[in-house]
Each structure stands twice: as C-alpha cells, then as structure tokens.
Image: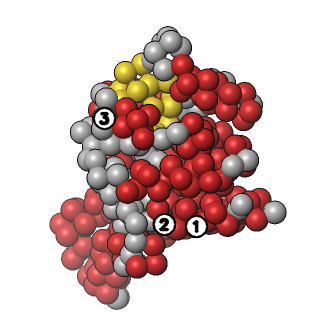
Amino acid sequence: MVLYNQISKNVTKTWLYVIGCAAILFGIGWFLSYYYQDPQILVAGAFLSFGSTMVSYWFSDKIVLGLNGARHIAEKKDFPELYRIVENLAITAGLPVPSIYVINDPQPNAFATGRDKNHAVVAVTAGLLEILDKKELEGVIAHEMSHIGNRDILLSAVVAVVVGLIAFVSDWFIRFSRFNHRDRDNDRRGGEVMFFVGLVGMILAPIVATLIQLAISRRREFLADANAALLTRYPEGLAGALQKISQSPRMSRYAHQATANMYITDPFKSDAFGGSRTPWLLKLFSTHPPAEERIAALRQMM
C-alpha cells in the first residue's frame, strides 16, 4: 500500500509542476499581449521554440549516446547477465526489449533514452557492472525501464518546450522592449510602472521555470524508484545500488551538464549523501534528490 501511495503522490506532484510551468507561460503571454497589443510575436516565439525542441526530441538518443561514448552491445555473449536482466525485466514490465549500450566509464551510473518505448535505449557504465551484484543491477535496470514505461522522456520534452518558450519570450522582451517602451509608456498612464513590473517578471520567469523543470526531474526519480521496487518486488536491491553508486569516489569521463539529469544519480555528485543536512537552496538546483532520501524512501516500502 505504501508503494502505490508513493507512486500516486509523485504522479500528482509532477503534473502540478507542469501546470505551474503552463501558468507562468500564460502570464507571460497575457502581459505581452497587453503591453504590445500584438499576440503574433508570442505565436512566432512558440513556433521557433517548439520546432527546435522537436528536433532535439527526435534525435536526442543519438546525441546523448554520442556525447557519452556509448557502445552498442549486439551480442548476448558479450554481457550475458546484463542481457538476461534487461530482457526479463522488459517482459515483466510488458515493454519491448530496449537496445543495450555500455559506456567505458569507471563511474558507476546508468540512464535510459529514446523518444518512446519502441525506440528506447538503456545504457550502463563499465563501473556500474563492476561494483553491483545481480540484485542491485536488477534494481538499476528496473529503474531505467520504469523511466521508459512512465514515458518520462515524453514528459521531459513537453516541459522543455514550455521552459524553452518562457526563456525565449523573456529574453526577447528584455532585449527589445527598451527601444520602444518610452513612446508606448507616454501614451498611457502608469506605463512606466507596468514596464518595470513586466521586466522583473521576465527576468524571474525563466529562473522559476528552470526550478520547476528541475523539480520535475527530481520527482520523476522518486517515481522511477517506486516503480522499480514494484517491478522487482525487492526495494533493497535498488537501495543497495544507490548506496554503492553514491559512495563511489570515481568521477565520470563523459558526463555533461546538459545530460546530467538523465542518469540514475548525478554524475557530478551534487546528490551525494547529505539528506536532511543538504542545504535547501542546493536541493532546489539539483537534478536529483539526495541519495539518502531516495534510499530511505525505498526502505520504507519494504
């Protein structure tokens, strides 16, 4: 019962965050329409942002795998245990077997990518295969399979569209409004106040939207943890894996800030052990919840 409550709670919070992004976007749209009396500017910004995001969405797997130096494993004989675990968990989850990649990286980590369940990829590092036992590896793979089953990549793309659009129109307003706001302000009472209120809002909107995006990323990690425990029926496997990964001193050779949120733990170690001792401001700007909190949540499900 605790497990199902955890899943339900995380889904609800995730969609609340998405609604928050949409509300920010609506507020920006209203302000620009009011200030410039020209909604076509917002439509143009939306088209540009959506188009660039869709391109990255369709080719995100190839980009990410290339950035991380991942190697496709086409033969079961190369990594027989990894193959069996992925195949068995895919069958259990009712998903197509994803492509399997291995990254020659000493840091233990893993991620899933691909635009949908039929074009999914699971990538693990050599360091992960080295330090985890079978049950722990099953927990990690189940976590990544949960990301695929939960359509987290699709949700991330939708949020990226909204956040990207917010950043675009905010930047446009800040750059170009200074050239003509004085003439417009002289035409109506209170225009100067309205301009500076809008300017402050435009500066803060991308920051707030980014914080919402990071919060969604953290919330999806909790959800994938809960689903992985449900899939394997053994929460301790993933909990043990997270403990080993978080305590590993090895640094990543291939990780990038742009792809850090995709990994099961932050490759830059900002989610290392700290739990309640981690400053709240640091948590806000983290792509992952502290490992200690995730482990505690998993062990409450036992």
Q: Which mark is residue 292?
A: 2
Label 2 near label 3: C-beta < 8 Å? no
Q: Kindly indicate the quadrant of the structure image that contains residue 69.
A: top left
Residue 240: x %, y % from top left: 53, 53
Determine the secondary structure under disc 2: helix
Furthest-left residue in this view: 179
Q: Nearer the viewer, residue 172 or 103?
A: 103
Q: Which mark is residue 296?
A: 1
Disc 2 residue type? Glu
Disc 3 residue type? Asp
Q: Which mark is residue 183?
A: none
Inter-mark Cα distance, 3 to 2: 24 Å
Which is nearer the N-term, disc 3 or disc 1?
3
Inter-mark Cα distance, 2 to 1: 6 Å
Label 1 near label 2: C-beta < 8 Å? yes
Inter-mark Cα distance, 3 to 1: 28 Å
Q: Kindly indicate the quadrant of the structure image that contains residue 150.
A: top right
Determine the secondary structure under disc 1: helix
Q: How many residues crowd around disc 1 within 10 Å: few (fewer than 14), some, or many (20 or more)? A: few
* Visual colour scheme: secondary structure
Which is nearer the N-term, disc 3 or disc 2?
3
Q: Nearer the viewer, residue 52 or 227?
A: 227
Q: Answer with left or right where residue 44 lies relative to residue 92.
A: left
Determine the secondary structure under disc 3: loop
Disc 1 residue type? Ala
Furthest-right residue in this view: 1
Residue 30: x %, y % from top left: 48, 68
Q: Kindly indicate the quadrant of the structure image that contains residue 9.
A: bottom right
Q: Residue at x 33, y 62 (%)?
A: 270
Q: Which mark is residue 105?
A: 3
Q: How many residues crowd around disc 2 within 10 Å: few (fewer than 14), some, or many (20 or more)? A: some
Q: Answer with left or right where residue 210 lies relative to residue 232.
A: left
